[in-house]
Protein backbone atom coordinates (compact mmCIF):
# COMPACT_ATOMS: atom_id res chain seq x y z
CA UNK A 1 0.00 0.00 0.00
CA UNK A 2 2.78 2.39 0.90
CA UNK A 3 4.51 1.89 -2.33
CA UNK A 4 1.31 2.43 -4.24
CA UNK A 5 0.71 5.62 -2.33
CA UNK A 6 4.15 6.80 -3.20
CA UNK A 7 3.79 5.99 -6.86
CA UNK A 8 0.26 6.97 -7.67
CA UNK A 9 -1.99 9.92 -7.13
CA UNK A 10 -5.70 9.73 -6.56
CA UNK A 11 -7.77 12.65 -7.75
CA UNK A 12 -11.50 12.68 -7.44
CA UNK A 13 -13.06 13.47 -10.77
CA UNK A 14 -15.22 16.09 -9.12
CA UNK A 15 -12.17 18.19 -8.34
CA UNK A 16 -11.10 18.19 -11.97
CA UNK A 17 -14.56 18.70 -13.37
CA UNK A 18 -16.93 20.20 -10.81
CA UNK A 19 -20.43 18.85 -11.14
CA UNK A 20 -22.03 22.25 -11.62
CA UNK A 21 -19.55 23.20 -14.29
CA UNK A 22 -20.16 20.01 -16.17
CA UNK A 23 -23.87 20.53 -15.95
CA UNK A 24 -23.47 24.07 -17.15
CA UNK A 25 -21.50 22.78 -20.09
CA UNK A 26 -24.26 20.32 -20.84
CA UNK A 27 -26.79 23.13 -20.77
CA UNK A 28 -24.72 25.27 -23.04
CA UNK A 29 -24.23 22.50 -25.53
CA UNK A 30 -27.94 21.84 -25.50
CA UNK A 31 -28.61 25.50 -26.22
CA UNK A 32 -26.30 25.38 -29.20
CA UNK A 33 -27.97 22.22 -30.27
CA UNK A 34 -31.41 23.78 -30.24
CA UNK A 35 -30.04 26.73 -32.19
CA UNK A 36 -28.72 24.38 -34.80
CA UNK A 37 -32.03 22.61 -34.81
CA UNK A 38 -33.87 25.77 -35.73
CA UNK A 39 -31.29 26.49 -38.39
CA UNK A 40 -31.85 23.03 -39.77
CA UNK A 41 -35.58 23.67 -39.89
CA UNK A 42 -34.91 26.85 -41.79
CA UNK A 43 -32.79 24.97 -44.29
CA UNK A 44 -35.48 22.36 -44.65
CA UNK A 45 -37.94 25.13 -45.43
CA UNK A 46 -35.59 26.45 -48.09
CA UNK A 47 -35.29 23.03 -49.60
CA UNK A 48 -39.03 22.48 -49.76
CA UNK A 49 -39.45 25.95 -51.30
CA UNK A 50 -36.85 25.07 -53.83
CA UNK A 51 -38.50 21.81 -54.81
CA UNK A 52 -41.85 23.54 -55.10
CA UNK A 53 -40.31 26.15 -57.33
CA UNK A 54 -38.70 23.47 -59.47
CA UNK A 55 -42.08 21.85 -59.94
CA UNK A 56 -43.64 25.18 -60.81
CA UNK A 57 -40.95 26.09 -63.28
CA UNK A 58 -41.30 22.72 -64.92
CA UNK A 59 -45.06 23.09 -65.18
CA UNK A 60 -45.32 26.68 -66.34
CA UNK A 61 -44.20 26.21 -69.95
CA UNK A 62 -46.96 23.69 -70.43
CA UNK A 63 -49.45 26.49 -71.02
CA UNK A 64 -49.10 29.48 -73.33
CA UNK A 65 -50.30 31.76 -70.55
CA UNK A 66 -51.65 31.47 -67.05
CA UNK A 67 -54.18 33.75 -65.43
CA UNK A 68 -52.86 35.09 -62.17
CA UNK A 69 -53.20 38.05 -59.88
CA UNK A 70 -50.23 40.21 -60.64
CA UNK A 71 -48.88 41.75 -57.46
CA UNK A 72 -48.66 45.50 -57.50
CA UNK A 73 -46.64 46.46 -54.52
CA UNK A 74 -47.26 44.49 -51.39
CA UNK A 75 -50.87 45.34 -50.77
CA UNK A 76 -52.48 45.33 -54.20
CA UNK A 77 -53.03 43.09 -57.19
CA UNK A 78 -54.11 43.42 -60.77
CA UNK A 79 -55.88 40.64 -62.56
CA UNK A 80 -53.52 39.57 -65.30
CA UNK A 81 -51.72 36.65 -66.82
CA UNK A 82 -48.28 35.20 -67.19
CA UNK A 83 -46.90 35.40 -70.70
CA UNK A 84 -43.77 34.06 -72.35
CA UNK A 85 -43.97 31.05 -70.14
CA UNK A 86 -40.64 29.61 -71.20
CA UNK A 87 -38.61 32.66 -70.32
CA UNK A 88 -37.31 33.03 -66.83
CA UNK A 89 -35.14 35.72 -65.39
CA UNK A 90 -32.94 34.19 -62.71
CA UNK A 91 -30.90 36.12 -60.20
CA UNK A 92 -27.37 34.81 -60.14
CA UNK A 93 -26.28 37.07 -57.33
CA UNK A 94 -24.52 40.40 -57.09
CA UNK A 95 -27.37 41.98 -59.01
CA UNK A 96 -26.82 39.91 -62.13
CA UNK A 97 -29.87 38.37 -63.72
CA UNK A 98 -29.85 35.93 -66.58
CA UNK A 99 -32.58 34.87 -68.97
CA UNK A 100 -33.09 31.15 -69.04
CA UNK A 101 -35.49 28.60 -70.37
CA UNK A 102 -37.48 26.39 -68.10
CA UNK A 103 -35.01 23.52 -68.40
CA UNK A 104 -31.99 25.66 -67.70
CA UNK A 105 -33.73 27.26 -64.77
CA UNK A 106 -34.50 23.86 -63.36
CA UNK A 107 -30.84 22.95 -63.63
CA UNK A 108 -29.85 26.08 -61.77
CA UNK A 109 -32.40 25.41 -59.09
CA UNK A 110 -31.28 21.82 -58.74
CA UNK A 111 -27.74 22.96 -58.21
CA UNK A 112 -28.97 25.33 -55.54
CA UNK A 113 -30.87 22.45 -54.00
CA UNK A 114 -27.71 20.38 -53.93
CA UNK A 115 -25.83 23.14 -52.17
CA UNK A 116 -28.63 23.37 -49.62
CA UNK A 117 -28.54 19.64 -49.15
CA UNK A 118 -24.83 19.65 -48.47
CA UNK A 119 -25.32 22.44 -45.99
CA UNK A 120 -27.97 20.40 -44.27
CA UNK A 121 -25.64 17.43 -44.18
CA UNK A 122 -22.85 19.42 -42.60
CA UNK A 123 -25.31 20.85 -40.12
CA UNK A 124 -26.45 17.38 -39.23
CA UNK A 125 -22.87 16.27 -38.72
CA UNK A 126 -22.29 19.24 -36.46
CA UNK A 127 -25.37 18.36 -34.51
CA UNK A 128 -24.17 14.81 -34.17
CA UNK A 129 -20.92 16.07 -32.74
CA UNK A 130 -22.76 18.35 -30.37
CA UNK A 131 -24.94 15.50 -29.21
CA UNK A 132 -21.89 13.39 -28.52
CA UNK A 133 -20.37 16.29 -26.66
CA UNK A 134 -23.50 16.78 -24.62
CA UNK A 135 -23.68 13.13 -23.71
CA UNK A 136 -20.01 13.18 -22.79
CA UNK A 137 -20.50 16.16 -20.54
CA UNK A 138 -23.55 14.52 -19.07
CA UNK A 139 -21.60 11.38 -18.31
CA UNK A 140 -18.79 13.40 -16.83
CA UNK A 141 -21.24 15.29 -14.66
CA UNK A 142 -22.90 12.14 -13.42
CA UNK A 143 -19.57 10.46 -12.80
CA UNK A 144 -18.29 13.45 -10.91
CA UNK A 145 -21.48 13.45 -8.88
CA UNK A 146 -21.01 9.77 -8.11
CA UNK A 147 -17.57 10.50 -6.75
CA UNK A 148 -15.45 8.76 -9.31
CA UNK A 149 -11.72 9.07 -8.75
CA UNK A 150 -8.85 9.13 -11.15
CA UNK A 151 -5.78 7.11 -10.20
CA UNK A 152 -2.61 8.19 -11.85
CA UNK A 153 0.60 6.27 -11.58
CA UNK A 154 3.88 6.99 -13.30
CA UNK A 155 5.07 4.38 -15.69
CA UNK A 156 8.44 2.98 -14.67
CA UNK A 157 10.32 1.62 -17.63
CA UNK A 158 13.87 1.07 -16.41
CA UNK A 159 13.47 -2.63 -15.78
CA UNK A 160 11.93 -3.23 -19.11
CA UNK A 161 14.58 -1.46 -21.16
CA UNK A 162 17.40 -3.05 -19.23
CA UNK A 163 16.13 -6.49 -19.86
CA UNK A 164 15.61 -5.74 -23.48
CA UNK A 165 19.05 -4.34 -23.99
CA UNK A 166 20.61 -7.33 -22.33
CA UNK A 167 18.76 -9.98 -24.17
CA UNK A 168 17.83 -8.34 -27.43
CA UNK A 169 20.73 -7.17 -29.54
CA UNK A 170 23.44 -9.73 -28.85
CA UNK A 171 21.19 -12.58 -29.82
CA UNK A 172 20.25 -11.15 -33.14
CA UNK A 173 23.36 -9.26 -33.95
CA UNK A 174 25.95 -11.46 -35.59
CA UNK A 175 29.33 -9.89 -35.01
CA UNK A 176 30.56 -10.72 -38.45
CA UNK A 177 27.98 -8.47 -39.95
CA UNK A 178 27.88 -5.69 -37.49
CA UNK A 179 30.84 -3.78 -38.83
CA UNK A 180 29.93 -4.09 -42.42
CA UNK A 181 26.39 -3.11 -41.68
CA UNK A 182 27.23 0.25 -40.40
CA UNK A 183 29.14 1.10 -43.48
CA UNK A 184 26.63 -0.30 -45.84
CA UNK A 185 23.44 1.02 -44.43
CA UNK A 186 23.67 4.16 -46.49
CA UNK A 187 24.13 2.48 -49.85
CA UNK A 188 21.92 -0.54 -49.41
CA UNK A 189 18.80 1.06 -50.69
CA UNK A 190 20.62 2.06 -53.76
CA UNK A 191 21.91 -1.42 -54.23
CA UNK A 192 18.53 -2.94 -53.75
CA UNK A 193 17.04 -0.67 -56.36
CA UNK A 194 19.95 -1.53 -58.61
CA UNK A 195 19.14 -5.16 -58.14
CA UNK A 196 15.53 -4.59 -58.97
CA UNK A 197 16.48 -2.72 -62.10
CA UNK A 198 18.71 -5.61 -63.06
CA UNK A 199 15.76 -7.89 -62.57
CA UNK A 200 13.75 -5.68 -64.84
CA UNK A 201 16.45 -5.97 -67.42
CA UNK A 202 16.41 -9.72 -67.17
CA UNK A 203 12.69 -9.79 -67.36
CA UNK A 204 12.74 -7.82 -70.53
CA UNK A 205 15.44 -9.97 -71.97
CA UNK A 206 13.53 -13.09 -71.23
CA UNK A 207 10.40 -11.67 -72.69
CA UNK A 208 12.27 -10.97 -75.84
CA UNK A 209 13.82 -14.37 -75.76
CA UNK A 210 10.47 -16.00 -75.37
CA UNK A 211 9.07 -14.41 -78.48
CA UNK A 212 12.10 -13.54 -80.55
CA UNK A 213 13.64 -16.94 -79.85
CA UNK A 214 17.04 -15.61 -79.02
CA UNK A 215 17.47 -13.55 -82.12
CA UNK A 216 18.25 -10.55 -80.06
CA UNK A 217 21.70 -9.07 -80.05
CA UNK A 218 22.63 -10.04 -76.56
CA UNK A 219 21.96 -13.69 -76.96
CA UNK A 220 24.33 -14.48 -74.17
CA UNK A 221 22.44 -12.41 -71.78
CA UNK A 222 19.19 -13.98 -72.80
CA UNK A 223 20.56 -17.44 -72.54
CA UNK A 224 21.66 -17.06 -69.02
CA UNK A 225 18.87 -14.80 -68.01
CA UNK A 226 16.48 -17.50 -67.08
CA UNK A 227 18.75 -19.27 -64.76
CA UNK A 228 20.08 -16.09 -63.46
CA UNK A 229 16.65 -14.87 -62.90
CA UNK A 230 15.54 -17.95 -61.05
CA UNK A 231 18.43 -17.67 -58.73
CA UNK A 232 17.93 -14.05 -58.22
CA UNK A 233 14.34 -14.58 -57.38
CA UNK A 234 15.20 -17.22 -54.90
CA UNK A 235 17.79 -14.98 -53.38
CA UNK A 236 15.37 -12.14 -53.28
CA UNK A 237 12.78 -14.16 -51.55
CA UNK A 238 15.35 -15.37 -49.16
CA UNK A 239 16.32 -11.85 -48.45
CA UNK A 240 12.83 -10.71 -48.02
CA UNK A 241 12.20 -13.51 -45.68
CA UNK A 242 15.29 -12.92 -43.73
CA UNK A 243 13.86 -10.43 -41.23
CA UNK A 244 11.29 -12.90 -40.10
CA UNK A 245 13.68 -15.68 -39.45
CA UNK A 246 15.84 -16.24 -36.47
CA UNK A 247 19.01 -14.81 -37.73
CA UNK A 248 21.72 -16.80 -36.10
CA UNK A 249 20.68 -20.18 -37.29
CA UNK A 250 19.06 -19.16 -40.46
CA UNK A 251 21.97 -17.20 -41.64
CA UNK A 252 24.18 -20.20 -41.41
CA UNK A 253 21.79 -22.15 -43.46
CA UNK A 254 21.55 -19.42 -45.96
CA UNK A 255 25.27 -19.42 -46.24
CA UNK A 256 25.12 -23.09 -46.87
CA UNK A 257 22.52 -22.71 -49.46
CA UNK A 258 24.51 -20.03 -51.05
CA UNK A 259 27.50 -22.26 -51.07
CA UNK A 260 25.47 -24.88 -52.77
CA UNK A 261 24.44 -22.43 -55.34
CA UNK A 262 27.96 -21.41 -55.93
CA UNK A 263 29.13 -24.90 -56.31
CA UNK A 264 26.49 -26.19 -58.57
CA UNK A 265 26.06 -23.24 -60.77
CA UNK A 266 28.93 -21.28 -62.16
CA UNK A 267 26.95 -18.32 -63.23
CA UNK A 268 29.01 -15.22 -63.48
CA UNK A 269 26.24 -12.98 -62.47
CA UNK A 270 25.31 -15.06 -59.50
CA UNK A 271 28.20 -13.79 -57.54
CA UNK A 272 27.06 -10.33 -58.10
CA UNK A 273 23.59 -11.22 -57.04
CA UNK A 274 24.88 -12.91 -54.00
CA UNK A 275 26.78 -9.86 -53.11
CA UNK A 276 23.66 -7.80 -53.49
CA UNK A 277 21.64 -10.20 -51.54
CA UNK A 278 24.16 -10.40 -48.80
CA UNK A 279 24.20 -6.71 -48.43
CA UNK A 280 20.51 -6.48 -48.53
CA UNK A 281 20.28 -9.28 -46.09
CA UNK A 282 22.64 -7.58 -43.74
CA UNK A 283 20.59 -4.45 -43.95
CA UNK A 284 17.53 -6.44 -43.14
CA UNK A 285 19.32 -7.92 -40.22
CA UNK A 286 20.21 -4.55 -38.95
CA UNK A 287 16.71 -3.33 -39.34
CA UNK A 288 15.50 -6.37 -37.64
CA UNK A 289 17.71 -5.89 -34.69
CA UNK A 290 16.64 -2.34 -34.43
CA UNK A 291 13.07 -3.35 -34.54
CA UNK A 292 13.46 -6.05 -32.06
CA UNK A 293 15.02 -3.84 -29.52
CA UNK A 294 11.75 -2.14 -29.05
CA UNK A 295 9.33 -4.76 -30.15
CA UNK A 296 7.99 -7.04 -27.53
CA UNK A 297 5.47 -8.55 -29.84
CA UNK A 298 8.11 -9.85 -32.18
CA UNK A 299 6.83 -13.36 -32.19
CA UNK A 300 3.38 -12.17 -32.99
CA UNK A 301 4.68 -10.10 -35.84
CA UNK A 302 6.65 -12.96 -37.05
CA UNK A 303 3.66 -15.16 -37.09
CA UNK A 304 1.83 -12.65 -39.21
CA UNK A 305 4.61 -12.12 -41.63
CA UNK A 306 5.13 -15.80 -41.80
CA UNK A 307 1.60 -16.31 -42.83
CA UNK A 308 1.98 -13.61 -45.39
CA UNK A 309 5.11 -15.23 -46.54
CA UNK A 310 3.57 -18.61 -46.98
CA UNK A 311 0.89 -17.02 -49.03
CA UNK A 312 3.44 -15.55 -51.25
CA UNK A 313 5.20 -18.85 -51.49
CA UNK A 314 2.04 -20.47 -52.57
CA UNK A 315 2.12 -18.18 -55.52
CA UNK A 316 5.76 -18.56 -56.39
CA UNK A 317 6.50 -22.08 -55.44
CA UNK A 318 10.18 -21.43 -55.95
CA UNK A 319 11.99 -20.21 -52.92
CA UNK A 320 14.14 -21.00 -50.02
CA UNK A 321 12.05 -21.23 -46.98
CA UNK A 322 11.98 -19.35 -43.76
CA UNK A 323 11.02 -21.29 -40.74
CA UNK A 324 9.56 -20.25 -37.48
CA UNK A 325 11.39 -21.21 -34.38
CA UNK A 326 9.28 -24.20 -33.61
CA UNK A 327 9.82 -25.49 -37.09
CA UNK A 328 13.54 -25.56 -36.75
CA UNK A 329 13.75 -28.99 -35.27
CA UNK A 330 12.52 -31.01 -38.16
CA UNK A 331 12.73 -28.27 -40.78
CA UNK A 332 16.45 -28.10 -40.37
CA UNK A 333 16.79 -31.77 -40.82
CA UNK A 334 14.95 -31.52 -44.04
CA UNK A 335 17.01 -28.72 -45.32
CA UNK A 336 20.24 -30.37 -44.41
CA UNK A 337 19.19 -33.34 -46.38
CA UNK A 338 18.46 -31.07 -49.21
CA UNK A 339 21.82 -29.44 -49.05
CA UNK A 340 23.52 -32.49 -50.27
CA UNK A 341 21.36 -32.84 -53.29
CA UNK A 342 21.48 -30.69 -56.36
CA UNK A 343 20.14 -27.19 -56.24
CA UNK A 344 17.28 -28.29 -58.35
CA UNK A 345 16.24 -30.88 -55.88
CA UNK A 346 16.75 -28.58 -53.03
CA UNK A 347 14.46 -26.13 -54.60
CA UNK A 348 12.05 -28.92 -55.12
CA UNK A 349 11.92 -29.93 -51.54
CA UNK A 350 11.66 -26.50 -50.18
CA UNK A 351 7.99 -26.09 -50.82
CA UNK A 352 7.63 -29.02 -48.55
CA UNK A 353 9.11 -26.96 -45.82
CA UNK A 354 6.59 -24.37 -46.62
CA UNK A 355 3.93 -26.92 -46.11
CA UNK A 356 5.45 -27.60 -42.80
CA UNK A 357 5.27 -24.00 -41.87
CA UNK A 358 1.64 -23.89 -42.66
CA UNK A 359 0.97 -27.05 -40.84
CA UNK A 360 2.99 -26.00 -37.87
CA UNK A 361 1.25 -22.72 -37.55
CA UNK A 362 -2.11 -24.40 -37.47
CA UNK A 363 -1.52 -27.74 -35.82
CA UNK A 364 1.98 -28.15 -34.68
CA UNK A 365 1.83 -31.71 -33.52
CA UNK A 366 0.77 -33.09 -36.85
CA UNK A 367 3.47 -31.35 -38.81
CA UNK A 368 5.85 -34.30 -39.01
CA UNK A 369 3.08 -36.51 -40.25
CA UNK A 370 2.31 -34.24 -43.08
CA UNK A 371 5.87 -33.98 -44.22
CA UNK A 372 5.72 -36.95 -46.43
CA UNK A 373 2.34 -36.44 -47.89
CA UNK A 374 2.55 -32.99 -49.37
CA UNK A 375 6.09 -33.64 -50.41
CA UNK A 376 5.28 -35.07 -53.75
CA UNK A 377 2.63 -32.55 -54.50
CA UNK A 378 4.86 -29.67 -53.77
CA UNK A 379 7.54 -31.31 -55.82
CA UNK A 380 5.12 -31.38 -58.63
CA UNK A 381 4.13 -27.86 -57.87
CA UNK A 382 7.67 -26.84 -58.21
CA UNK A 383 8.32 -28.52 -61.50
CA UNK A 384 5.90 -26.14 -63.03
CA UNK A 385 8.06 -23.22 -62.20
CA UNK A 386 11.35 -24.92 -62.79
CA UNK A 387 10.35 -25.19 -66.40
CA UNK A 388 11.48 -21.62 -66.46
CA UNK A 389 14.99 -22.81 -66.74
CA UNK A 390 14.21 -25.37 -69.39
CA UNK A 391 16.35 -23.50 -71.89
CA UNK A 392 19.45 -24.85 -70.27
CA UNK A 393 18.40 -27.73 -68.16
CA UNK A 394 15.88 -29.44 -70.32
CA UNK A 395 14.15 -31.14 -67.50
CA UNK A 396 11.39 -33.51 -68.24
CA UNK A 397 8.49 -32.03 -70.03
CA UNK A 398 6.38 -34.96 -69.03
CA UNK A 399 6.64 -33.85 -65.43
CA UNK A 400 5.48 -30.52 -66.46
CA UNK A 401 2.42 -32.01 -68.00
CA UNK A 402 1.69 -33.84 -64.79
CA UNK A 403 1.81 -30.73 -62.72
CA UNK A 404 -1.42 -29.20 -63.89
CA UNK A 405 -3.39 -29.47 -60.69
CA UNK A 406 -0.87 -28.50 -58.09
CA UNK A 407 1.44 -26.09 -59.81
CA UNK A 408 0.63 -22.54 -59.11
CA UNK A 409 2.56 -21.10 -61.98
CA UNK A 410 2.84 -23.41 -64.92
CA UNK A 411 3.21 -21.16 -67.90
CA UNK A 412 6.74 -20.92 -69.16
CA UNK A 413 5.48 -19.35 -72.33
CA UNK A 414 4.23 -16.41 -70.37
CA UNK A 415 6.96 -15.76 -67.89
CA UNK A 416 6.26 -12.09 -67.58
CA UNK A 417 3.22 -12.56 -65.48
CA UNK A 418 5.13 -14.79 -63.16
CA UNK A 419 7.79 -12.19 -62.67
CA UNK A 420 5.30 -9.67 -61.78
CA UNK A 421 3.59 -11.98 -59.40
CA UNK A 422 6.77 -12.83 -57.66
CA UNK A 423 7.92 -9.35 -57.35
CA UNK A 424 4.73 -7.79 -56.16
CA UNK B 1 -34.29 45.19 7.72
CA UNK B 2 -31.38 45.09 5.38
CA UNK B 3 -32.36 41.72 4.02
CA UNK B 4 -35.92 42.93 3.52
CA UNK B 5 -34.68 45.84 1.49
CA UNK B 6 -32.43 43.57 -0.50
CA UNK B 7 -35.38 41.40 -1.32
CA UNK B 8 -37.45 44.34 -2.41
CA UNK B 9 -34.73 45.65 -4.65
CA UNK B 10 -34.43 42.28 -6.23
CA UNK B 11 -38.16 42.12 -6.86
CA UNK B 12 -38.18 45.55 -8.48
CA UNK B 13 -35.26 44.61 -10.66
CA UNK B 14 -36.95 41.45 -11.69
CA UNK B 15 -40.06 43.41 -12.59
CA UNK B 16 -38.01 45.69 -14.79
CA UNK B 17 -36.08 42.89 -16.47
CA UNK B 18 -38.80 40.34 -16.90
CA UNK B 19 -41.86 42.44 -17.51
CA UNK B 20 -41.19 45.99 -18.55
CA UNK B 21 -38.27 45.46 -20.88
CA UNK B 22 -39.85 42.62 -22.90
CA UNK B 23 -43.02 44.74 -23.12
CA UNK B 24 -40.99 47.58 -24.47
CA UNK B 25 -39.30 45.40 -27.05
CA UNK B 26 -42.62 44.00 -28.18
CA UNK B 27 -44.21 47.42 -28.46
CA UNK B 28 -41.32 48.67 -30.56
CA UNK B 29 -41.60 45.66 -32.85
CA UNK B 30 -45.34 46.28 -33.31
CA UNK B 31 -44.75 49.87 -34.14
CA UNK B 32 -42.13 48.90 -36.70
CA UNK B 33 -44.67 46.63 -38.35
CA UNK B 34 -47.15 49.45 -38.59
CA UNK B 35 -44.46 51.68 -40.02
CA UNK B 36 -43.85 49.12 -42.69
CA UNK B 37 -47.53 48.97 -43.56
CA UNK B 38 -47.65 52.71 -43.76
CA UNK B 39 -44.79 52.63 -46.19
CA UNK B 40 -46.49 49.99 -48.34
CA UNK B 41 -49.63 52.03 -48.62
CA UNK B 42 -47.85 55.23 -49.35
CA UNK B 43 -45.93 53.43 -52.10
CA UNK B 44 -49.16 52.08 -53.49
CA UNK B 45 -50.69 55.50 -53.44
CA UNK B 46 -47.72 56.93 -55.30
CA UNK B 47 -47.87 54.15 -57.86
CA UNK B 48 -51.57 54.58 -58.51
CA UNK B 49 -51.13 58.31 -58.82
CA UNK B 50 -48.36 57.62 -61.27
CA UNK B 51 -50.60 55.36 -63.32
CA UNK B 52 -53.32 57.99 -63.27
CA UNK B 53 -50.98 60.73 -64.35
CA UNK B 54 -49.62 58.69 -67.27
CA UNK B 55 -53.04 57.17 -67.95
CA UNK B 56 -51.61 53.69 -68.23
CA UNK B 57 -54.27 51.14 -69.07
CA UNK B 58 -52.16 48.10 -69.76
CA UNK B 59 -49.05 46.99 -67.98
CA UNK B 60 -46.26 44.51 -68.40
CA UNK B 61 -44.28 43.56 -65.33
CA UNK B 62 -42.08 40.85 -63.89
CA UNK B 63 -43.52 38.51 -61.30
CA UNK B 64 -41.33 36.96 -58.68
CA UNK B 65 -42.00 33.25 -58.63
CA UNK B 66 -39.81 32.77 -55.59
CA UNK B 67 -36.08 32.49 -55.06
CA UNK B 68 -35.59 35.51 -57.29
CA UNK B 69 -36.89 33.75 -60.37
CA UNK B 70 -38.96 36.13 -62.45
CA UNK B 71 -41.40 35.74 -65.26
CA UNK B 72 -43.09 38.27 -67.45
CA UNK B 73 -46.71 39.05 -66.68
CA UNK B 74 -49.18 41.02 -68.69
CA UNK B 75 -51.95 43.15 -67.18
CA UNK B 76 -54.48 44.00 -69.87
CA UNK B 77 -56.57 46.34 -67.76
CA UNK B 78 -55.11 48.35 -64.91
CA UNK B 79 -58.21 50.33 -64.10
CA UNK B 80 -59.40 47.71 -61.67
CA UNK B 81 -57.15 47.04 -58.76
CA UNK B 82 -57.54 44.62 -55.86
CA UNK B 83 -56.37 46.11 -52.61
CA UNK B 84 -55.66 44.25 -49.41
CA UNK B 85 -58.02 45.52 -46.75
CA UNK B 86 -56.79 43.24 -44.01
CA UNK B 87 -57.57 39.74 -42.72
CA UNK B 88 -56.82 38.34 -46.15
CA UNK B 89 -59.62 40.19 -47.93
CA UNK B 90 -59.02 42.00 -51.18
CA UNK B 91 -61.52 44.47 -52.59
CA UNK B 92 -61.77 45.44 -56.23
CA UNK B 93 -61.42 49.19 -56.53
CA UNK B 94 -61.14 51.70 -59.29
CA UNK B 95 -58.22 54.09 -59.00
CA UNK B 96 -60.13 56.86 -57.26
CA UNK B 97 -61.77 54.42 -54.86
CA UNK B 98 -58.40 52.90 -54.10
CA UNK B 99 -56.89 56.29 -53.41
CA UNK B 100 -59.74 57.07 -51.09
CA UNK B 101 -59.29 53.84 -49.21
CA UNK B 102 -55.55 54.32 -49.01
CA UNK B 103 -55.87 57.75 -47.48
CA UNK B 104 -58.27 56.40 -44.86
CA UNK B 105 -55.98 53.55 -44.19
CA UNK B 106 -52.97 55.82 -43.85
CA UNK B 107 -54.82 57.90 -41.37
CA UNK B 108 -55.61 54.88 -39.28
CA UNK B 109 -52.05 53.64 -39.47
CA UNK B 110 -50.78 57.03 -38.36
CA UNK B 111 -53.11 56.85 -35.37
CA UNK B 112 -51.84 53.38 -34.55
CA UNK B 113 -48.28 54.56 -34.71
CA UNK B 114 -49.02 57.39 -32.37
CA UNK B 115 -50.65 54.95 -29.98
CA UNK B 116 -47.68 52.69 -30.01
CA UNK B 117 -45.35 55.60 -29.50
CA UNK B 118 -47.31 56.64 -26.46
CA UNK B 119 -47.25 53.08 -25.16
CA UNK B 120 -43.53 52.89 -25.60
CA UNK B 121 -43.04 56.16 -23.84
CA UNK B 122 -45.14 55.03 -20.90
CA UNK B 123 -43.20 51.77 -20.61
CA UNK B 124 -39.98 53.72 -20.60
CA UNK B 125 -41.44 55.95 -17.91
CA UNK B 126 -42.34 52.92 -15.83
CA UNK B 127 -38.87 51.55 -16.12
CA UNK B 128 -37.46 54.84 -15.03
CA UNK B 129 -39.86 55.01 -12.12
CA UNK B 130 -38.94 51.58 -10.84
CA UNK B 131 -35.27 52.34 -11.20
CA UNK B 132 -35.82 55.47 -9.19
CA UNK B 133 -37.59 53.40 -6.55
CA UNK B 134 -34.64 51.06 -6.35
CA UNK B 135 -32.35 54.02 -5.96
CA UNK B 136 -34.42 55.32 -3.11
CA UNK B 137 -34.42 51.93 -1.44
CA UNK B 138 -30.66 51.77 -1.62
CA UNK B 139 -30.52 55.37 -0.39
CA UNK B 140 -28.16 56.40 -3.11
CA UNK B 141 -27.87 60.09 -3.80
CA UNK B 142 -30.04 61.33 -6.67
CA UNK B 143 -27.30 61.79 -9.19
CA UNK B 144 -27.99 63.88 -12.24
CA UNK B 145 -25.26 62.24 -14.27
CA UNK B 146 -26.30 58.73 -13.33
CA UNK B 147 -29.83 58.41 -14.64
CA UNK B 148 -30.45 54.73 -14.74
CA UNK B 149 -31.02 52.87 -17.99
CA UNK B 150 -31.33 54.91 -21.10
CA UNK B 151 -33.50 53.73 -23.95
Image: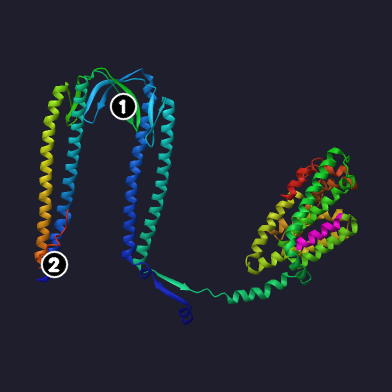
The magenta stretch spans which residues? A269-281
Q: Chain letter for mark 2, please.
A: B
Q: Is residue A111 visible?
A: yes
Q: Is residue B19 left or right of residue A362?
A: left
| Residue occupying the point 72% across, 63% down | A186
Tell me the mark number nearer the camera, choosing from 2 and 1: 1
| Residue occupying the point 10% across, 42% down | B115
Find disc 2 in the rendering and name its residue: B6
Q: Classify mark 1: helix, strand or loop.
A: strand
Where residue A415 sits, quadrant-wise, is top right
Q: Which mark is residue A183?
A: none
Question: Can residue A276 be found in the magenta stretch?
Answer: yes
Label pair 2/1, CB-CB below 8 angstroms: no
Q: Is residue A369 visible?
A: no
Q: Residue furthest front?
A: B53
Q: Which SS type dominates the magenta stretch? A: helix
Amino acid sequence: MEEAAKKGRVTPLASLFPVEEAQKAVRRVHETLSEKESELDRFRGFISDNTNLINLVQKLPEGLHHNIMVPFGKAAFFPGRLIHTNEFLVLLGEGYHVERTSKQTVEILKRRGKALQSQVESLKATMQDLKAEASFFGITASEAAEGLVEIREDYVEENFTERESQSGPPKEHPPSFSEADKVKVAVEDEEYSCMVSRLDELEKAEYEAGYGNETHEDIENVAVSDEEYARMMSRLDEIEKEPETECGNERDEDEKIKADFDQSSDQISLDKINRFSEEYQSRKLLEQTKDKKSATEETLDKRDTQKDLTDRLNCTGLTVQSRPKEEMSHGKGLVHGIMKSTPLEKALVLPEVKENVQAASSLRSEAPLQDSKPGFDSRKAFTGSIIERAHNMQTSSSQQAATSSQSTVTQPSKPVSRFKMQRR
Amino acid sequence: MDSFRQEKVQRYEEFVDKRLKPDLVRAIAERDKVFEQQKTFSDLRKNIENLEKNSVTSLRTMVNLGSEVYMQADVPDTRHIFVDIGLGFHVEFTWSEALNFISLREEKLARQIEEYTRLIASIKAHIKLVCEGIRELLQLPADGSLQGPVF
